[in-house]
Image (cartoon, rainbow, N blue to C red):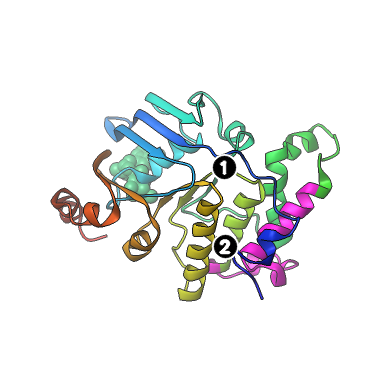
């Protein structure tokens, strides 16, 4: 009924216009909080058409790195490149305009808006609709935003819930809603902070199917995830972080077998 990315919904005309394939790169990123280097010289690439995963114990610096990539935190040193473009100095909303989307570890949806309205916000953010709205200008590409919204709802299996206020929905559904909102902007690069947290098994399977489909369409995906099974199932390349640094990177099996990774987890306690 709710086809995955290879199904009827993806073939319909409602798909948001695809971004050209883009890659996300971090070079020598550093972010300090007081005396603590939460991110301490990280190099990372999330290539187009691939799923890249970031793992590591609590406090390793994953979310801080994410925030530096997304533009919600400024790094103290280093560069963030989107495609060939240096976006280090750009705020988050400007990066969204350039085709970067993200979801949050703490779910961020508008509770009083309906499912459709939440997704529509994502579709309009890309087009600069929120800024135009503030200026009293009509939202651009209303029809296109509508189609992008419909496509994202169908992709995540949310069409039947379209009129429900987000506040009434369980956590698993909210995670999928947040992802739908991010996808409605038609991003070329997607950052996901613990997207499977709070999902049940069918929801996790849907998530995995959708993420694989997005990568197959050329999107660059970077996910932080605690669920090692899901990472093993999805990721092309894994970066393991500890103490703000990348301690291992490579194919998932090699990284999980790396003694430096086991040691990092041991020192920080089990994930
Ligand atoms: P992870 O997502 O891997 O669990 P975080 O990036 O959240 O790790 O945190 C890395 C380190 O930075 C931790 O020691 C954490 O306490 C610290 N930290 C994160 N955010 C802040 C902040 N806003 N202010 C001070 N310290 C922070
Ligand atoms: Mg985190």
Which stretch did the figure color magenta? 144-172
Element under disc 1? loop
Residue at the (39%, 40%) spot, across then down: 64
In the figure, 220 relative to 80: above or below? Answer: below
Residue 1 visible? The answer is: yes
Tell me if residue 158 is in the magenta stretch: yes
Task: Find ligand 1 in the image and state its quadrant.
Answer: top left
Which mark identifies residue 234? none
Tell me if residue 151 is in the magenta stretch: yes
**How many angstroms separate mark 2 from mark 1 (CA)?**
18 Å
| Position of residue 241 measured from the top left corner of the image (x, y, whole percent) | 27, 45
256 or 18: nearer the eye?
A: 18
Q: How many marks?
A: 2
Give the position of the N terminus as an image quadrant.
bottom right
114 or 190: nearer the eye?
A: 190
Which mark identifies residue 188? 1
Which mark identifies residue 176? 2
Residue 113 visible? The answer is: no
Residue at the (50%, 26%) spot, across then down: 84
Residue at the (63%, 53%) spot, across then down: 181
Callout 2 environment at 10 Å: few (<14), some (14 to 19), or many (20+)? many
| Position of residue 10 measured from the top left corner of the image (x, y, whole percent) | 66, 60
Give the position of the C terminus as an image quadrant.
bottom left
| Position of residue 135 measured from the top left corner of the image (x, y, whole percent) | 81, 31
């Amino acid at each position: 009924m709710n086809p995955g990315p290879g199904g009827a919904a993806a073939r319909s005309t409602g798909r948001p216009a695809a971004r050209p394939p883009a890659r996300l790169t971090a070079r020598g990123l550093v972010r300090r909080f007081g005396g603590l280097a939460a991110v301490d010289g990280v190099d990372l690439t999330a290539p187009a058409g691939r799923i890249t995963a970031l793992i590591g114990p609590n406090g390793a610096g994953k979310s801080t790195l994410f925030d530096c990539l997304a533009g919600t935190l400024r790094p103290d040193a280093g560069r963030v490149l989107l495609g060939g473009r240096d976006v280090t100095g750009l705020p988050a909303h400007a990066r969204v305009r350039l085709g970067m989307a993200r979801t949050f570890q703490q779910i961020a949806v508008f509770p009083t808006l309906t499912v459709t309205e939440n997704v529509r916000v994502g579709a309009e953010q890309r087009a600069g609709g929120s800024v135009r709205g503030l200026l009293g200008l009509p939202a651009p590409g209303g029809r296109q935003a509508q189609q992008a919204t419909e496509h994202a709802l169908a992709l995540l299996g949310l069409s039947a819930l379209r009129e429900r206020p987000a506040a009434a929905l369980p956590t698993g559904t909210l995670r999928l809603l947040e992802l739908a909102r991010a996808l409605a902007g038609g991003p070329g690069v997607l950052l996901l902070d613990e997207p499977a947290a709070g999902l049940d098994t069918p929801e996790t399977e849907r998530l995995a199917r959708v993420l694989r489909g997005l990568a197959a369409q050329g999107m660059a995906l970077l996910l932080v995830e605690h669920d090692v099974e899901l990472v093993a199932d999805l990721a092309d390349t894994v970066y393991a972080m500890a103490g703000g640094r990348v301690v291992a990177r490579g194919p998932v099996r090699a990284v999980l077998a790396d003694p430096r990774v086991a040691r990092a987890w041991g020192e920080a306690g089990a994930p």
